[in-house]
Amino acid sequence: MKTTVVCPLLEPPEPKPGDLIEIFRPMYKHWAIYVGDGYVIHLAPPSEFAGAGAASIMSALTDKAIVKKELLCDVAGGDKYHVNNKHDSEYTPLPPNKIIQRAEELVGKEIHYKLTSENCEHFVNELRYGVARSDQVCPQHLYLTLGVRSFPQLTVTGCEWRQSYKQDKKIA
C-alpha cells in the first residue's frame, strides 16, 4: 500500500526546480533550493538530522555545514514552508539546469558556515542568482536609544558570502 506524505505547504505554487524554499522554523527561517522529485539541497550543521526544526538553531554554534540533498518533507518536518523567489525582480535567476548542476556538485561537501555571512540563505541565493545575500542578517539597522533621541549606531555587516561557488579553499 502506497502512503502519500503531505507536507504543510503554506500557499501555491508548487515548487519547480531551481525555486527557493523558505521554511518557517520556530525562531528563524531555514532556506533550501528545490531540485525536483520532492528533493531540496540545503546547508545543515554536521550533526543536524532532517526536520530538526528549532534544534537546528544550534547551527549558530558551529563554523561548518554539510551540503545535503534530502526530501523537502523531511527537511521541513512539521514546519510550514513556501516558494519564495523574492529577489527575482532584482536579480536574473540562472537557468534551472545550471542552478541544479551547481547545487548537486556541492552535495556531501563540508563548507564554512557563519550565521551572519555564510548561512543557508546566502547559500541558496548564491546558487539561484550568483549573489550571496541574506535578508535575515542584512541589512539590519540597530538603534541605540538614549532618553528621547535615537542614534544609528550599528549596521550588521557581512552581506557578502565569502564562500564563492568557485572558491574551493574553504570546502573541506
Image (cartoon, helix red, strand yellow):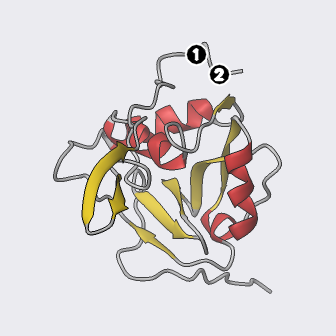
- In the picture, residue 93 is in which quadrant? top left
40 up-or-down from 160: above or below: below
Relative to residue 60, is residue 147 depicted above or below? Answer: below
129 relative position to 6: left or right: left
Q: Residues within 10 Å of mark 2 (few under 14, many from 20)?
A: some
Report the label total: 2
Q: Is residue 52 visible?
A: no
Q: Nearer the viewer, residue 49 or 138?
A: 138
Q: Are marks 2 and 1 in contact (CB under 8 Å)?
A: yes
Residue furthest toward the left? 89
Q: What is the C-alpha distance between the residues marked 2 and 1? A: 5 Å
Residue that badge 2 annotates = 171
- How far across and how far down the image is residue 106, in percent? 60, 32
Q: As shown in the figure, which amino acid type bears the numbered disc 2?
A: Ile
Q: Amino acid at mark 1?
A: Asp
Q: Residue at x 28, y 50 (%)?
A: 152
Picture coordinates of residue 97, whole percent (x, y): 39, 40
Q: Is residue 34 above or below residue 76?
A: above
Disc number at residue 37?
none
The residue at the point 69 percent across, 39 percent down is 65
Mark 1 residue element: loop
Q: Is residue 13 visible?
A: yes
For the point 21% across and 42% down, which residue is it? Answer: 92
Which type of secondary structure does the marked residue at label 2 adopt? loop
Identify the image quadrant of the C terminus: top right
Q: In what quadrant of the picture does the N terminus appear? A: bottom right
- Seen from the viewer's position, the closer of residues 149 and 41 is 149
* Residue 94 located left or right of residue 9: left
Q: Which residue is mark 1?
A: 168
Q: Position of residue 75 (x, y in %)?
A: 66, 64
Say if 41 sits above or below 129 in the image: below
